[in-house]
Image: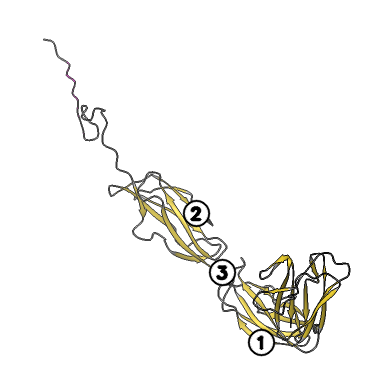
Amino acid sequence: MRKRLVTLLVCSSVVACGGGDGGGGGPNPTPDVIAKTTTDDGDNQTGVVGSALALPFCVRVSNDGASQPDVMVTWSTATGSISPTSDPTSFDGSSCSTLTLPQAVGSYMAQASLSGATGSPVTFHATANAAAPTQLQEAFGDGTTGEVNSDIQIAARVTDAFGNGIAAIAVAYAVTSGNATVTPSSTGSVAGTGNAPVTVTLGSTAGAVTVTATSPGLTGSPRVFNLTAVVTPPPPSAITITLSNNSFTPSVDTVAVGGTVTWDWPTNLVGSHSVTTTGPTSFTSDIRGEIFGPTMYGPITFNTAGTYFYYCTHHGAPGSPPSGMSGRIVVK
């Protein structure tokens, strides 16, 4: 009796038997899910500029709730650095990476990505605070020149090693040469900028003034501010503006309150010109139409301080300031 060879085909839920869908293929696989770990995910940490966060950021990769080991997760950040930049998941499906903060104060992000996974990318946030104060710098005011008996604003700046401003650090100021006073004599640096501003009131004597800012233990302390007190001659009580071909000379001039201005058309002037005011403050305009030289308009008296704009109706255009053939008178 001959034995017959029987072939046994065993079907499972993974391999489809027959051609139920005409292609012999099975259902689409369930995609992985990437999400922050339920505890100790490291999100929303605060750290010091230029340093690594105390805790890593962590995600978990799962499929139908089951942990997925040995799945490569990519880590990235637009600022600072993160390590590792790729990390395979462990037996519990977790992958972690540590962010080193940039050197500037601010808010930053990092991401964990897994191609094709639901929830990818996962975003983490961190805040970088300034480091310890180490520097005393000039914020503004050094080299300023001011009128005698006037006020000048100066400020030193307290920063960390990376230039970030530090708040609440005391800075003492003192006039070390020249005629001036400083108020207050000591002040604290303010949040954000790290500036410690004070007011220097120049004395009645013209000359050089030196102010020093001191904060013990900081590099750059004492910081020296070199100022100059000057006596500016008062503006003249009368000025003359010359009209040339399509221009006023000078186009900008200053006169004292109560002073006068005269416009002069010279003998060699070609073409017609006028003096017409424009802007929020004005004076009596030349209304005689086309005027050829030689002639004069004025003197016009200016009793109120301010800036007065004017132009030629033939060769300029109104505005504030006007354009083309135009000028400006400053009364002070």
Q: Which residue is at the front of the view, 257 or 58?
A: 257
In the picture of the structure, the residue carrying the numbered disc 3 is 131
- SS class of the residue under badge 1? strand
Q: Which residue is at the front of the view, 101 or 267?
A: 267
Amino acid at pointer 1: Thr
Number of labels in the image equals 3
Please state the extent of the stretch shown in magenta in the rendering. 5-12
- Choose the circle earlier in sequence order: 3 or 1: 3
Q: Residue at x 78, y 89 (%)?
A: 204
Q: Which residue is at the front of the view, 124 or 244?
A: 244
Q: Residue furthest right?
A: 267
Q: How crowded is mark 1: few (under 14 residues within 10 Å), some or many (20 or more)?
A: some
In the picture of the structure, the residue carrying the numbered disc 1 is 183
Above or below residue 236? Residue 51 is above
Magenta segment, prevailing SS (helix, strand or loop): loop
208 drawn magenta: no
Above or below residue 222? Residue 116 is above
Q: Give the Cα separation between the discs numbered 3 and 2.
A: 21 Å
Tag on residue 201?
A: none
In the picture of the structure, the residue carrying the numbered disc 2 is 77
Q: Which residue is at the front of the view, 293 or 305?
A: 293
Q: Position of residue 175 (x, y in %)?
A: 73, 85
Q: Give the Cα separation between the discs numbered 1 and 2.
A: 46 Å
